[in-house]
Image (cartoon, rainbow, N blue to C red):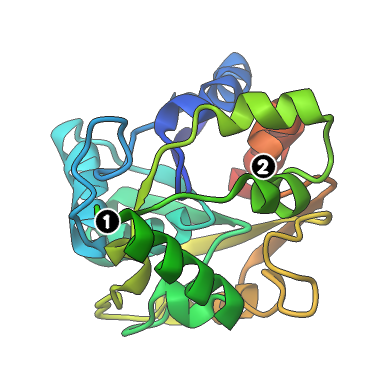
Amino acid sequence: MSTFALIHGAWHTGRELERVAQVIAGAGHGVFTPTIKGNGPTDSRDLGLLDAIESIVDFLVSRDLRDLVLVGHSYGGMIITGVADQVPGRIRRLVYWNAFVPNDSESVNDMLPPQYVELFDSIAAARGDGAVVLPFSVWRETFMNDVDLATVHRAFSVLNPHPIRTLRDKISLKINPAEMPVAKSYINCTEDISLPHHYPWHPRLSRKLGLFRLIQTPGSHELLFSNPERLATAIMDAGRD
């Protein structure tokens, strides 16, 4: 049996992954769903990428977690890459689930289409509190395009403002993902159009992993809400020895 740590994406917390974690735990695995610093409902939004990465490093070290399958969703790909760079001896496999794969000195914004960078910057400037929120129309049409409207509304209601600095900050790595000796997997949800298919998650970002295992599964970017059982199966397939 394996131990999984599931790292959420932007606007989320670890709570939204609990249904997925229950399925994985039901198969006999250990599983953790921490919340990244800056993403909790009452957290300060004036935080950067290094703060976020170090919060997950601290979570693993404080619990002395080792031999982990570390799973990152979307923005969580930045986090798991930084964690693996800081504490490589604790990680058995990295699993990127429709996630950003950064090389040294890259930011999330460097990997986003320009129209998203402009949108998020304008929202953050209008808010003036260091955070960005996701417009419902974007959430409905590109993040949760595979479920009914009521499910979309329920999922949207639990989202939190996200620290804009974490999208702008460039990651500092000692070694790029392709050269990391840890095993790697990429989960690609085939109906995910949160990044348009002409500017895709896979293979545009996954190819930066070097040697990796590819797991493809039907679903949108937010498969954790629309089909947590299917997502749990994909995560276990991605994390197996």
Q: Are marks 2 and 1 in contact (CB under 8 Å)?
A: no
Q: Nearer the viewer, residue 214 or 116?
A: 116
Report which residue position mark 1 lands on.
Answer: 89
Q: Which quadrant would residue 112 be assigned to in this image?
A: bottom right
What percent of the width, then of the height, locates residue 26?
61, 14
In percent of the image, x 29 and y 75: which residue is there? Answer: 171
Report which residue position mark 2 lands on.
Answer: 222
Q: Nearer the viewer, residue 153 or 178?
A: 153
Q: Earlier in the sequence, mark 2 or mark 1?
A: 1
In percent of the image, x 38 and y 44: which residue is there? Answer: 161
Q: Which quadrant would residue 236 be assigned to in this image?
A: top right
At label 1, which amino acid type do we have? Gly
Q: Nearer the viewer, residue 154 or 88?
A: 154
In percent of the image, x 51 and y 22: which residue is there? Answer: 18
Q: Is residue 222 above or below residue 122?
A: above
**Is 238 situated left or right of 169 in this image?**
right
Crowding near pointer 2: few (<14 within 10 Å), some, many (20+)?
many
What percent of the width, then of the height, locates residue 229?
73, 26
Cα–Cα span, label 2 and label 1: 30 Å
At label 2, which amino acid type do we have? Glu
What percent of the width, then of the height, locates residue 214?
72, 62
